[in-house]
Image (cartoon, rainbow, N blue to C red):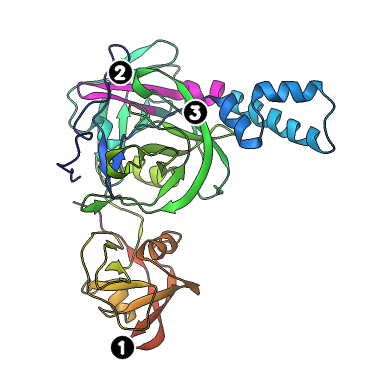
Amino acid sequence: MQQDPTDHLHNSPAPAPTFRSSTPTRIVAPRWFLSGMLATALIAGTIGGAVGHSVGTTTVLAQTTPAAGSQINVGVAATIEQASVAAAQGAGAAVVSVRTDQGLGSGVIYDASGLILTNAHVVSGARTITVGLIDGRHFTGRSLGADTGFDLAVVKIDGSNLPTATLGSSSNLQVGEFVMAIGNPYGFDHTVTTGVVSALNRPVSEGQGSYNQPMIQTDAAINPGNSGGPLFDLQGNVVGITTLIAAPNGVPAQGLGFAVPIDTAKRIAPQLAQNGTVTRSGQPYLGVSLSDVPSQGSSSSSQGGARRRTQPATPLGVDHGAVVSQLGANSPAAQGGVQSGDIVTSFNGRDVYSSDELLQGLVQHAPGDRVQLGVVRGGQTMNVTVTLGEAPVAS
């Protein structure tokens, strides 16, 4: 990944309150801070705030005469709290600390044979890996494989009676759904934070590249030391692997965290465990470079697997869409009739206002799906049907 030499944060290990270090932070465009680690806020306070009550306030309300209908809200708060506690105490046992000679991260045991999911940036290049469990046991780990494009890695430990977490599905997530993260921010082992799913299918770029999948956005707190930890739903299923937070101008933003969808991890992890590398991306592919319609003659761009570059102004009269700035030879888009310079204004009947919106629509499909693009070419509007390919694996 490219690093921004003008930012002083990304090369510095985050300070720890005691003797523990954390992995170096990284930047996500535009100048976003990749702490790589997911975080935590107090269950009671966050959940209470989400439904309009703190745990303490809920107790008070239960002892007073409630307004009509407020008993229902108290009951909902209590149910959410109980689910959070159960998930933290149950699935949380499978969350581990991942300490290397480079710093500290988190992970989750997903197979009783000792397979652990974490971030690639936690273990890539590490000479030593030590995995710690909440029951006090520590094991020497070895990396079976890591991929920086997906920012996923599989670590193996040899032990018996290992707790495991259930890998759920990210395809069923809904915006506003409660989630919890468990990890080791700044060395505070097994810290729990809660929040909601803030957005889905969020494209994320770093420097001149991008991650090979869109992210789950969450407002759960994220701090150095949480990288590679699990994002749970309230049933205790892993729905994501927490990875980074936004930091415009190098200052970490509040409540802008991102996690790799677990459906991506479930597709990539077996390849890493068996082959040490990713051989099949499983991602849909158009084979184009895209840029937003510029407002004053130029714009930043993102690729349908993605780079950033400056593009000329689009034809007059087009005020939204994604400009096809480059077209791969024999790419799915080219085979479907897309031409360089086309402005994609709709995707499967939905208006497209930016290249990121087009990518958000694209990633909801699979290789082999047929999609319809509404394009403007030479001032004329037309529809083009494209059969999606499979994105090549980044070298």
> Would you say residue 212 sits in the magenta stretch?
no
Q: CA distance from mark 1 to mark 3?
A: 52 Å
Residue at 71% in and 25% down: 58
- Disc marking residue 378: 1
The magenta stretch is: 88-107
Q: Nearer the viewer, residue 24 or 31?
A: 31
Q: Position of residue 2 (x, y in %)?
A: 18, 46
Q: Amino acid at mark 1?
A: Gly
Q: Reading the chain from its start, which is encountered first: label 3 or label 2?
A: 2
Height in image: 236 above or below 60?
Answer: below
Query: Which residue lies under the disc numbered 3?
Result: 193
**Helix, strand, or loop for circle 2?**
loop
Q: Is residue 137 visible?
A: yes
Q: Which residue is mark 2?
A: 16
Checking the image for residue 324, the label placed there is none
Q: Indicate the amino acid at tag 2.
A: Ala
Going from N to C along the chain, the mark reached first, 1 or 3, is 3
Q: Find the distance from the CA under tag 2 to the CA under tag 1.
A: 58 Å
For the N terminus, give its image quadrant.
top left
- For image coordinates 31% across by 45% down, the residue present is 150
Image coordinates of residue 17 in percent, x first then y, are 32, 15
190 vs 356, nearest the viewer: 356
Q: Is residue 378 above or below residue 33?
A: below
Of circles 3 and 2, the one toward us is 2
Q: Amino acid at mark 3?
A: Thr
Q: Is residue 169 visible?
A: no
317 sits left or right of 196 in the view: left
Q: Residue furthest front?
A: 296
> What residue sits 30% from the left and 29% below the top?
155
